[in-house]
Image (tube, coloured by chain):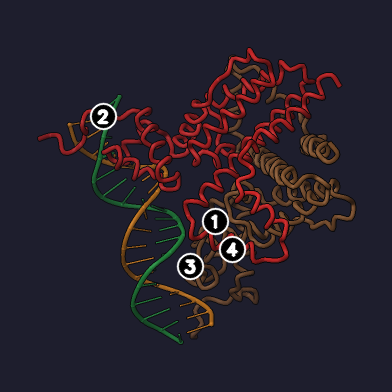
Chain colours: A brown, B red, C orange, D green
Amino acid sequence: MGRPKKVREGEAVLTFANIAETATKMADTDGIEKLSMRRLANELDCGVMSLYHYISDKEALVEALVDQVAKEVDAPNGEHGWRATAQQISESTLEAQLRHPWAVPIWSTTWPGPHRLRLMEYLLEALASSGLPSEIADLGFHALTNHIQGFAQQKVAFKQLDSRAEETGVRVQAMLSDETIPHVHEHIHFHQAGKETPDEFRFTLDLILDGLEKHITG
Amino acid sequence: MGRPKKVREGEAVLTFANIAETATKMADTDGIEKLSMRRLANELDCGVMSLYHYISDKEALVEALVDQVAKEVDAPNGEHGWRATAQQISESTLEAQLRHPWAVPIWSTTWPGPHRLRLMEYLLEALASSGLPSEIADLGFHALTNHIQGFAQQKVAFKQLDSRAEETGVRVQAMLSDETIPHVHEHIHFHQAGKETPDEFRFTLDLILDGLEKHITG
DNA sequence: ACCTGAACACCGTTCAAGT
DNA sequence: ACCTGAACACCGTTCAAGT
């Protein structure tokens, strides 16, 4: 009788891990803009304010969610050389981000948590072990992370297009009927033809890595 | 008597341009997260709902604001060759974005308006005129825009650090006392020393352009 | 220690009504 | 045509109170 409605079928012990997991699931399903403290509490069958015993802020929660995504990235051991390691980290980071598209736009805006720091460490370590001058290694780090980030962003943007097909049709049509931007038309066709798919990501990745490599001996 | 309080000192004719200008000013000053329809209406001395006669949506407004930033980018005429043109567009885009930091995180998320489309057209045109195979030109376009975007994002993130110095101190201190991430420490020192300033942006830009250039004759 | 409802200070937008 | 207040359906978070 003293138990009104809480404690659901065996799973509902309120925990930080529990909260974070449910929040991630909600963000994956409905997008992060639909993730509110109230909806989250509802999903967890608890009062909104109960969450604040495990979380200081919504911002802190989101930060933790982003770091969980970083945790999913495969951590290589670097035994195949700096270039293979950098490549693997880059590709694995991209994959993790694309699994959680909501994390992409806020990735750089959010403070790096422990897992993202570890990821940064691995990539910086790989670059440091390459024999590159340390300034070039630091610049190369940004070149690589910018590429990962920019590519993920663009991919996510295109993915959202498919979900809001009606609007997209209108927008793309409008672009294609503007005769002052023929090269944009060509570029749209490039994407529509799916010509990027072979390995667009690798193309620029290799371009950057090739460029860096020249600084080792030269 | 039939005039309660509106129509301010000579400037308050409600216009789309007027609304957009005021909104940009507010975003520049207080950040975009503080830009609400209500605060905007207040600033313009009108009722909130009056705005909806000039704007369909808050989303549409923000889209227009981002496009205004694109409008500020210098449009080169391409007479100095594809590489100089690409470089100038890249640098000018970066500068415009850094003048309006709020636009950076939402740049890629937002649908491109007429001015951003024009900017894309110019960059694509420069690449097309380079003699690059068209697939390489399309890939190079993304390599360049990703770099601009990623660099701007990182710069804005660092700028925000200065504004919230107390929190930053705590976060950076926490990173520096984690002994498992020595390369991250080195990277932080790299930034703190201001070693990037000479021309970090140009370094990766040239790296990309060099890499592309090889595809012209090769 | 853990949980909570009421309340506060906000949002964007619909609707029906004013001039 | 242009403007608007009231209302609706939401937010995140403080506070004071419950067990």
Chain designation of label 1: A
Which label lies toward us, 4 or 2?
4
Mark 2 Cα shell of 10 Å, populated few (<14), some (14-19), many (≥20):
few
Q: Nearer the viewer, mark 3 or mark 4?
A: 4
Q: Are marks 3 and 4 on the same chain?
A: no
Residue at the image point whose x is 70% and y is 39% from the top: A151
The residue wearing badge 3 is A48
For badge 3, the amino acid type reads: Val
Q: Disc 3 sits on a residue from what chain?
A: A
Q: Residue C5: x percent and y percent?
A: 40, 72
Residue named by callout 4: B173
Figure check: A70 above or below B46: below
Task: Kindly indicate whether the residue at mark 2 contacts the one at mark 1 (C-beta within 8 angstroms).
Answer: no
Q: Is there a contact, CB below 8 Å, between mark 3 and mark 4?
A: no
Separation of marks 1 and 3 at Cα, in angstroms: 13 Å
Residue type highlighted by circle 1? Leu
Q: Residue at x 38, y 32 (%)?
A: B21
- The residue shown at (40%, 45%) is B30
Residue B66, x across and y down, in percent: 50, 34
Q: Residues under labels 2 and 3: Cα distance? A: 45 Å
Mark 1 burial class by Cα count in 10 Å: few <14, some 14-19, many 20+: some
Q: Which residue is mark 2?
A: B11
Q: Residues within 10 Å of mark 4 (few under 14, many from 20)?
A: few
* Label 3: how many Cα within 10 Å (few below 14, some 14–19, many 20+): some
Label 1: which residue? A35
Judged by depth in the image, the label closer to the viewer, 1 or 2, is: 2
- For the residues labelled 1 and 2, the Cα–Cα distance comes to 40 Å
Going by the numbered disc 4, the residue's amino acid type is Gln
The residue lying toward the viewer, choosing from B198 and B129, is: B198
